[in-house]
Amino acid sequence: MYNYMLDTFIAVADCGSFTKAAGRLFISPTAVMKQMNTLEKHLDLKLIERTPSGIRLTDAGTAIYHDAKFMIDYSAKSIAAARAALQKKSFTFCVGTSLLNPAKPFMDLWYIVNSEFSSYKLRLVPFEDNHEGILTEVGHLGEKFDFLIGVCDSRAWLSRCSMLPLGYYKKMIAVPREHRLAEKSSIDLADLYGETLMMVKRGDSGVNDFIRNDLEKNHPAIHIEDTPQFYDLSVFNRCVETGNVLLTIECWKDVHPGLVSIPVNWEYRIPYGLLYSLNAPEPVLKFVRAVKNSLVPFS
């Protein structure tokens, strides 16, 4: 925007000599003189006059000097504003979406706060709910996508991302459509006696571990079968194929058409939230703050 030799000119004018200006700028006096000669030639103006006591500004030099600092400051601010506008205009939020972690809850948030992000774009990025690879997908936050909406009290997940809690989903059970419990509107734990309940193995989810401890201690007639640490479609398929009961959550009631989800008369629930990178850039953090400010407190 501005000619960098104006910095040298200002130093010369302030210091009154090439040698002192060179010391301020950490360059040689010869380099200072060359830059001044080049600047004068570029402007086709005589800016300084050499005198026995140093240098003094010509009338043209005085006029340039008065405006030069303003020009430098204005140029820096103009460039910064242009870069900020370019970043804002070109920024696209990439949102991960899958069968078990759909993007719809994110879209609900987006339409609440998007007035603050009118120039931003959205892109949905599909991924697979593979129980062996889901941690890799979560680790891609900040690279492959900026956000996920996920059910999450997984220690392994939360070690790889930040989370803004949004609410809770009730813990339910799912059974095949032909199962003896499929017609019930709700069940008690006693209804599960003699059944095999599929649930994630112990060690990663505080809520699931608490449920398991309760069942093992107070309801030993319910048999427990470990599933992989993280659900994928194969877990739901196994439930259909074996006729077992599956521990699930209310937002997954339509994941498999061969299963029916039923509320249980208990108070267990699991948090879900907005997941984003541990080292998220400012636009992502701005969106997180906007969502947080728009939330109604939940319990």
Image: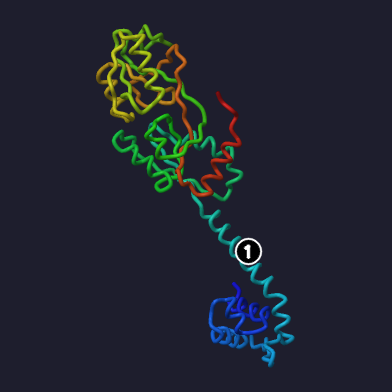
* Location of residue 25 by image quarter: bottom right
User: At 61% from the left edge and 76% from the top edge, which residue is drawn?
Assistant: 7
Q: Is residue 241 left or right of residue 140?
A: left
From the top left corner, tell me how far across and down residue 146 is, in percent. Answer: 45, 44
Task: Give the camera-side residue of 168 and 173.
Answer: 168
From the top left corner, tell me how far across and down residue 180 is, in percent. Answer: 32, 9
Task: Give the camera-side residue of 48 and 240.
Answer: 48
User: At 28% from the left edge and 22% from the top edge, which residue is drawn?
Assistant: 226
Q: Amino acid at mark 1?
A: Lys
Task: Give the camera-side residue of 56 and 85.
Answer: 56
Q: Quadrant of the C terminus?
A: top right
Q: Is residue 113 left or right of residue 269?
A: right
In the depicted structure, whether residue 12 falls above or below residue 276: below
Disc 1 marks which residue?
77
Q: Quadrant of the N terminus?
A: bottom right
User: At 34% from the left edge and 17% from the top edge, which residue is drawn?
Assistant: 175
Q: Is residue 233 left or right of residue 63?
A: left
From the top left corner, tell me how far across and down residue 194 is, in percent. Answer: 29, 8
Q: Tag 1's secondary structure? A: helix
Task: Give the camera-side residue of 42 and 10.
Answer: 10
